[in-house]
Image: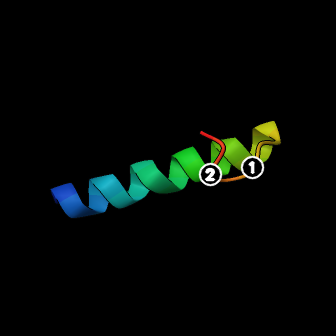
Amino acid sequence: MTIFVVSIFIVGAVVAAIYLIGFTPGEV
């Protein structure tokens, strides 16, 4: 896995966590 793929995975995981918690993107 390249750094690019890892960063995309991390960003996706963070966004998914934010949606699951109930916050809207941009508040963090």
Evaluate whether residue 1 shows in this view: no
Q: Residue at x 31, y 54 (%)?
A: 7
Q: CA distance from mark 1 to mark 2?
A: 11 Å
Viewport quadrant of the N terminus: bottom left
Asked if marks 1 and 2 touch (Cβ < 8 Å), the reply is no
Q: Position of residue 8 (x, y in %)?
A: 37, 60
Nearest the viewer among 28 and 6 is: 28
Nearest the viewer among 21 and 23 is: 23
Q: Give the number of marks.
A: 2
Q: Position of residue 18 (x, y in %)?
A: 68, 43
Viewport quadrant of the C terminus: top right
Q: Residues within 10 Å of mark 1 (few under 14, many from 20)?
A: few
| Amino acid on which the number 2 mark rests in the picture | Gly
Q: Which residue is mark 1?
A: 19
Q: Position of residue 21 (x, y in %)?
A: 78, 37
Q: Residue at x 29, y 53 (%)?
A: 6
Q: Is residue 21 above or below residue 10?
A: above
Horizontal arrangement in the rendering, residue 27 relative to residue 1 (left or right) = right
Nearest the viewer among 23 and 14 is: 23
Which structural element holds mark 2?
loop
Q: Is residue 21 above or below residue 1?
A: above
Which structural element holds mark 1?
helix
Q: Quadrant of residue 5?
A: bottom left
Q: Residue at x 65, y 51 (%)?
A: 16
Q: Which residue is mark 2?
A: 26
